[in-house]
Amino acid sequence: MELSDGGTESLDTKNIVLATGSEVTPLPPVPVDNAAGKIVDSTGALEIASIPQTMAVVGGGVIGLEMGSVWSRLGTDVTVIEFMDRLCPSMDAEVTKKFQTILKKQGFKFQLKTKVMESRLEDDGVVLKTEASKGGKEKEAKYDVVLVATGRRPYTDGLGLEALGIQTDRLGRIEVDEHFRTAVPSIYAIGDCIDGPMLAHKAEEEGIAAVETIAGYAGHVNYDAIPGVIYTYPEVASVGKTEEELKEAGVAYNVGTFPFQANSRARANGSSEGFVKILSEKETDRMLGSHIIGPNAGEMIAEAVLAIGEFGLLEFGIFFSVFGRRQVLLYSVPLPAVPSAAATIPSSLLYPSPLYHQPLFFPQYLLLTSLRIRCQLGGHCTDLSRPSHAVRGVQGGGDGCV
Ligand SMILES: Cc1cc2nc3c(=O)[nH]c(=O)nc-3n(C[C@H](O)[C@H](O)[C@H](O)COP(=O)(O)OP(=O)(O)OC[C@H]3O[C@@H](n4cnc5c(N)ncnc54)[C@H](O)[C@@H]3O)c2cc1C
């Protein structure tokens, strides 16, 4: 290891977990220079010295819209330039349509199906040359600041992966098996530098699972139950499948939507835009996806996460929540037999990992486990002031702990 203060150091270790994260994917026509403050990425966007009058956000994904929303609420005239025909293309289309309408009302401008071809620095701003994604007439416009938010890529520089025989895929992500093991059995990788959503709580769960595996336990991550939240106003939150994904997979489903306009608390608070959408399997009514756009969506999604990932079937909720992490045992038990089966399964089998709680009496076990699940899925576990997980902490709510 090369030390930042100079010199080197060696560590002898049985196992290594690579968790080197990700970095902004460069967009060659628009080179970022955070120090100059005119063409910035998400880091530079937090350090702009004064409120710009105009800003172009290149990329209509989560980070671009979150940052754009902050500056828009501070008074900046924000234009989002997006290559695709809609915002956040991996999200449920009905939600992103509503999202765009709400942001437009707030003053956002959108240029969809548009690509940025070139940028030119001038004394009083940055000129962007754009054209339609499919090609066409070029246009030019000048902005005070340009925020590049077109994506992130795994950061694996200097790890010497090739020399070790560790493979990366075409997007540069370290290849791992279902236990987060690379081609070298004692080297594991987790988080943004491997496949999957680039989210802090996903990285954290993978880290726990990898260490459980190293310690000889059954590490497991339920990828169907990883929520995503966009911290705009209002928030957008989702977990599970989108309607488009279900259609593509040929799954028969039901859709239920409920508008906040019909919710008294939302109306009383004067924040009744948006809706909740739930997708369930047609035959069994098992929840497959939940999407919320509206006030406090980031908190409300936790209930859906419990239902989708740990409850399995809505009706059988709490038992699945309690035993969620050892669900293999449960799934083999007929549902009416769940309570009695639960009583006969040794707690050491249900919850064997010392990384979580010690075996507990049932009521405590229930309480702690569901608390843990809630925290884990809400994106911040135990200590809300920890910088990497303090999503709410960033918003000024970082005191206290769970
Ligand atoms: C603007 C922005 C907003 C985000 N908002 C959210 C959000 O609201 N919710 C959410 O869940 N996620 C969010 N994320 C994503 C979240 O930050 C990442 O998914 C998460 O940090 C990934 O964790 P990680 O441990 O894989 O990597 P990181 O947290 O990036 O940690 C990697 C660490 O490794 C260090 N490192 C790299 N290479 C080496 C090396 N060779 N030697 C030693 N150290 C090294 C890096 O310096 C870094 O500290 C956001 C990301 C960005 C950029």
Image (cartoon, grey):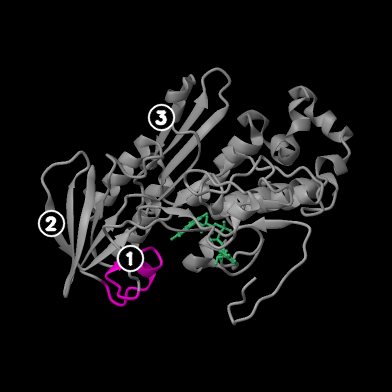
Disc 3/disc 1 C-alpha distance (Å): 34 Å
Dot 3 falls on a residue whose secondary structure is helix
Which amino acid type corresponds to the residue marked 3 in the rendered image?
Answer: Glu
Q: Earlier in the sequence, mark 3 or mark 1?
A: 1
Q: Which residues are magenta?
A: 35-51
Q: Earlier in the sequence, mark 1 or mark 2?
A: 1
Dot 1 falls on a residue whose secondary structure is loop
Q: Nearer the viewer, residue 276 or 113?
A: 113
Q: Nearer the viewer, residue 332 or 249?
A: 249
Residue 32, disc? 1
Q: Are marks 3 and 1 in contact (CB under 8 Å)?
A: no
Q: Residue at x 85, y 49 (%)?
A: 359
Q: Residue at x 41, y 67 (%)?
A: 43
Which amino acid type corresponds to the residue marked 2 in the rendered image?
Answer: Glu
Residue 401 on image: x %, y %: 65, 64
Residue most extreme to the bottom: 5
Disc 2/disc 3 C-alpha distance (Å): 35 Å
In the rendered image, which residue does mark 2 sit on?
A: 140
Residue 277 on image: x %, y %: 44, 35
| Residue 371 is at least partly visible in this image | no
Q: How many marks?
A: 3
Q: Residue at x 58, y 46 (%)?
A: 167
Q: Is residue 213 magenta?
A: no
Label 1: few (<14), some or many (≥20) within 10 Å? Answer: many
Which amino acid type corresponds to the residue marked 1 in the rendered image?
Answer: Val
Q: Image check: 333 left or right of 244?
A: right
| Residue 336 is at least partly visible in this image | yes
Vertical order, 265 against 310 (above or below): below
Q: Main secondary structure of the magenta part?
A: loop
In the rendered image, which residue does mark 3 sit on?
A: 244
Vertical order, 391 against 173 (above or below): below
